Image (cartoon, rainbow, N blue to C red):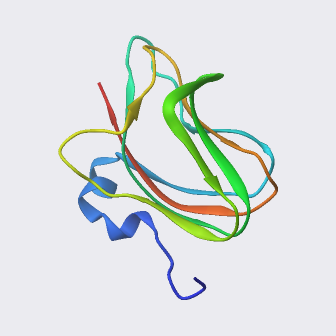
């Protein structure tokens, strides 16, 4: 896993449009991935994470878990939700897209999103 370094630069069209971020966290907390925008929803389009150990990742709309947004790792691994014609999850209107990490284990990689 040390050789593979996913970054937003792997998706240059998304980076140019400002529709993505490079996520890099390793603390037990709920991390704001995309800030809330009044009256708008955020759709998760694509993720390419490296997870360095046992971890539960839970996508949230503000403080509430999003159905289908939890991924459990029993050890190091990858989370690759590649770009496709739709989206994976979305927030409620006016709420931030957050990611909860259950362990102090590094999670890093690009996240692509759409504001609707």
- Seen at 38% across and 22% down, the residue is 41
- Seen at 74% across and 61% down, the residue is 54
Using the rendered view, name the quadrant where residue 92 is placed.
top left
Q: Is residue 25 above or below residue 90?
A: below
Give left or right: position of 116 versus 85. right
- Seen at 82% across and 56% down, the residue is 104
Give left or right: position of 30 versus 104. left
Q: Front-most of 31 and 88?
A: 88
Quadrant of the image containing the C terminus: top left
Q: Position of residue 87 (x, y in %)?
A: 30, 38
In the picture as drawn, the residue positioned furthest to the bottom comes out as 3
Give left or right: position of 28 versus 37. right
Q: Front-most of 51 and 8?
A: 51
- Seen at 80% across and 52% down, the residue is 103
Give left or right: position of 4 versus 76. left
Q: Is residue 81 above or below residue 63?
A: below
Q: Position of residue 18 (x, y in %)?
A: 35, 47
Q: Is residue 67 above or below residue 110?
A: above
Quadrant of the image containing the N terminus: bottom right
Q: Position of residue 112 (x, y in %)?
A: 38, 49
């Amino acid at each position: 896993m040390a050789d593979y370094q996913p970054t937003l630069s792997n998706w240059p069209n998304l980076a140019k449009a400002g529709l993505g971020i490079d996520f890099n966290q390793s603390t037990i907390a709920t991390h704001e991935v995309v800030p809330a925008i009044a009256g708008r929803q955020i759709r998760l389009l694509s993720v390419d994470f490296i997870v360095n150990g046992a971890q539960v990742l839970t996508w949230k709309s503000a403080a509430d878990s999003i159905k289908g947004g939890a991924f459990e790792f029993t050890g190091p691994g990858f989370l690759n939700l590649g770009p496709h014609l739709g989206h994976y999850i979305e927030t409620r209107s006016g709420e931030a897209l957050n990611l909860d990490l259950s362990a102090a284990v590094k999670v890093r990689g690009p996240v692509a999103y759409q504001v609707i």
